[in-house]
Image: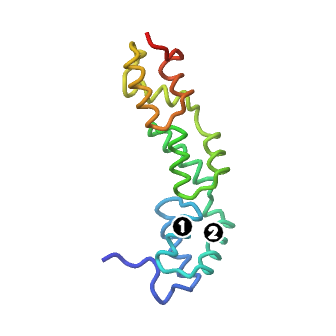
């Protein structure tokens, strides 16, 4: 059985909650809301959690902007598009303006879409309408917008 993140006697102790938060932060970055929910589910007191999170933000150990930028960069390297990344960040509880700023500061999405298309389908452009549609559906699933898809598959998506 796994060791509890916060022992029952430490549920209102800010030091115990801080130790639990630092244990989680040692593994990966967290959004403030995501970390708060995790600590709350571990049995921490809401007021003590809010105080600890405020301290961690002030000490820059917890930074939503940094988290969002790293999340966008790592997902873009994996070949995901901005629409899918934004949806994932929103599901984690990131603020809309934070998501938009991180996506805007991200890579050249047209270049990412082109690289993903080349990696999956090869260097040559799609030679038929059916192949263009197939590649477009793949890129749409990965989270790229229609502009990015047009740039990656060729500007003319007209039937041959």
Secondary structure beneath disc 1?
Answer: helix
Secondary structure beneath disc 2?
Answer: helix
The N terminus lies in which quarter of the figure? Answer: bottom left
Q: Residues within 10 Å of mark 1 (few under 14, many from 20)?
A: some
Residue nearer the viewer, 134 or 25: 134
Q: Is residue 56 left or right of residue 22?
A: right
Q: Please report whichever mark, 2 or 1, sits nearer to the chain's N-terminal start.
A: 1
The CA distance from mark 2 to mark 1 is 11 Å
Q: Are marks 2 and 1 in contact (CB under 8 Å)?
A: yes
The C terminus lies in which quarter of the figure? Answer: top left
Residue nearer the viewer, 8 or 150: 150
Residue occupying image coordinates x 39% and y 14%: 128
**Residue 135, position as x, y percentages in the image:** 41, 25
**Residue 100, position as x, y percentages in the image:** 64, 45
Residue occupying image coordinates x 51% and y 26%: 149
Residue occupying image coordinates x 45% and y 87%: 8
Report the residue that reaches farthest toward the bottom.
Answer: 9
Front of the two marks 2 and 1: 1
What residue did someone put label 1 on? 35
Residue nearer the viewer, 159 or 91: 159
What residue did someone put label 2 on? 56
**Residue 6, position as x, y percentages in the image:** 47, 80
Report the residue that reaches farthest toward the left.
Answer: 1
Q: Which mark is residue 57?
A: none
**Residue 52, position as x, y percentages in the image:** 62, 75
Which quadrant of the view contains residue 134?
A: top left
């Amino acid at each position: 059985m796994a060791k509890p993140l916060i022992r029952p006697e430490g549920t209102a102790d800010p030091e115990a909650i801080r130790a639990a938060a630092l244990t989680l932060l040692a593994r990966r970055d967290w959004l403030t809301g995501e970390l708060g929910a995790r600590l709350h589910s571990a049995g921490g007191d809401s007021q003590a959690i809010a105080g600890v999170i405020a301290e961690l933000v002030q000490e820059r150990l917890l930074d939503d902007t940094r988290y969002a930028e790293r999340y966008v960069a790592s997902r873009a390297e994996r070949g995901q598009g901005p629409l899918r990344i934004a949806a994932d960040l929103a599901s984690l509880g990131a603020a809309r303006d934070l998501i938009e700023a991180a996506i805007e500061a991200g890579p050249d999405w047209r270049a990412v879409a082109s690289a993903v298309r080349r990696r999956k389908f090869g260097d040559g452009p799609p030679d038929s309408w059916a192949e263009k549609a197939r590649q477009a559906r793949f890129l749409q699933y990965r989270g790229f917008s229609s502009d990015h898809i047009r740039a990656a598959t060729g500007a003319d998506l007209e039937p041959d």
